[in-house]
Image: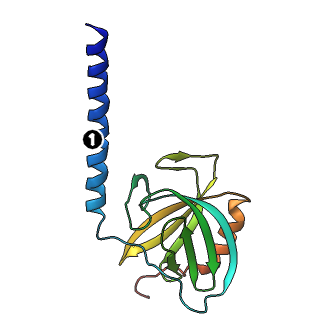
Amino acid sequence: MTREILFLVTGLIALGILLVMFFAWRRRLRRDAGLSAPLGVPEHAEVRARHEVLYVSTTRHDEPLERLAITPLAYRARGELAVTDRGVALCLDGAPTVFLAKDRLQAVDRATVTIDRVVEPGGLVKLVWDVADAHPVDSYLRLTEGDPQNLISELRPLIAAPKTGASS
C-alpha cells in the first residue's frame, strides 16, 4: 500500500465519521424542535443575586448522558445566572435570556457528570425544571467562581413545594 492510498483511506474514514456526527446532530435538532425554553424576564422581577456560569447542557430528567437540543439551550456557553424573586434568568452569550419561573422549577442539586463534562464531586449545579407540561429536564451549570452550595442555597426558596396526590 502506498503512502497516498493510506492517507486517502484515513481521510475518507475521518470524513465518514464527521458526516455521521453531522447527521446525528441534525436528527437530534429535528427531534427536539418542539421543545423550547421560556424567554424574557417578567417586569419588576427583583434580582437577588448574580453569578457568572458556564452552561454545560440540558438533558432528559435523570439521564445525564442524553442531551436535549432545546432552543436556545442546545449549545454550551458562558453566561450569567440571575436569581430573582420570580424565578431564574439565564443570560447566555449569543442567545436570548431564558427565564425559568418559580412554578417551573422542581429541584436543585449538585452533580458530577453530564454529557461532555466530568468535574470534581459536586462541581456542577443541576437545575430540574419543566420544559413542557409534566416533562422535567435537567440543566447543568458550572460556577466560574465560588461554591456551588451557595447558589443552591439561593435557589432552594424558589423551588415549589412538592405536589401531593389526593388527600386522605
Q: Farthest residue to the right: give it.
A: 146
Image-based side of 2 in relation to 61, left or right: left
Regarding mark 1 in the picture, which secondary structure is present there?
Answer: helix
Would residue 11 be found to the left or right of residue 116 on screen? Answer: left
* Residue at the image position 41 percent from the left and 60 percent from the top: 74
Looking at the image, which residue sits at the far bottom?
A: 44
Residue 66 position (above or below residue 36)? above
Residue at mark 1: 20
> How packed is label 1: few (under 14 Cα within 10 Å), some, or many (20 or more)?
few
Q: Looking at the image, which is closer to me, 91 or 130?
A: 91
Give the quarter of the figure containing the C terminus: bottom left
When asked about the image quadrant of residue 48, the answer is: bottom right
Query: 21 or 160: nearer the eye?
Result: 21
* Residue 154 percent coordinates (x, y): 68, 74
- Against 153, residue 55 (above or below) is above
Q: Amino acid at mark 1?
A: Val
Query: Residue 52, how many percent across, how many down?
Result: 66, 64
Query: At which x and y percent is residue 12?
Result: 26, 27
Tag count? 1
